[in-house]
Amino acid sequence: MARRPYHELPELLIKLLEDEGYFDDDPPRRSRRRSRRTRSRAQRSLRMPVKRKRKVSAYQKEFGRQLKKLKKKHPRTPVTRLMKRAHAATRRARRGR
């Protein structure tokens, strides 16, 4: 394509679009097939597999209890430090089991 002045570019674009039928009054016909997007969410969710929750281990349950206790006693202590303490407390609590 030869170099053209910038003021001619819009005219050239309009001419190209007219040649391709972009400005025709007739809208393109759609097929009668329903697209997936028209289906309701409920219909789509019927096909999706059910995501099952993972089983929480006994250790994790105990760890959660210990961490909760420590957070209540020491609310301003950083959580990383409390987690270390909760881990030690969990091991002590579960040792007898």
Image (tube, grey):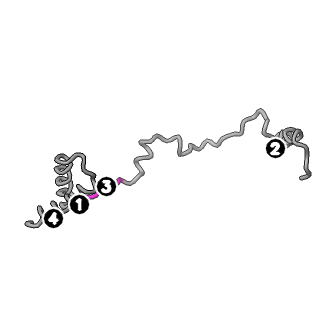
Q: Which of 35 and 70 is in front in this view?
A: 70
Corner quadrant of residue 18: top right
Determine the residue positioned at 91% across, 50% down. Answer: 3
For mark 1, what is the residue? 84
- Camera-nearest label, 3 or 1: 1
Q: How many marks?
A: 4
Amino acid tagged 2? Glu
Q: What element carries label 3?
A: loop
Q: Which residue lies furthest to the front in this view?
A: 76
For mark 3, what is the residue? 52
Q: Distance between the residues labelled 2 and 1?
A: 70 Å
Q: In this view, does 4 lie to the left or right of 60?
A: right
Residue 28: percent from the left, percent from the top?
A: 71, 39
Q: Which tag, 1 or 4, sits closer to the chain's start?
A: 1
Q: Residue furthest left?
A: 96
Corner quadrant of residue 43: top left
Q: Is mark 2 on a helix, strand or loop?
A: loop
Amino acid tagged 4? Arg
Determine the residue positioned at 16% across, 50% down. Answer: 69
Q: How far apart are marks 3 and 4 (CA)?
A: 29 Å
Badge 1 crowding class, 10 Å Cα cut-off, few under 14, some 14 to 19, many 20 or more, is few
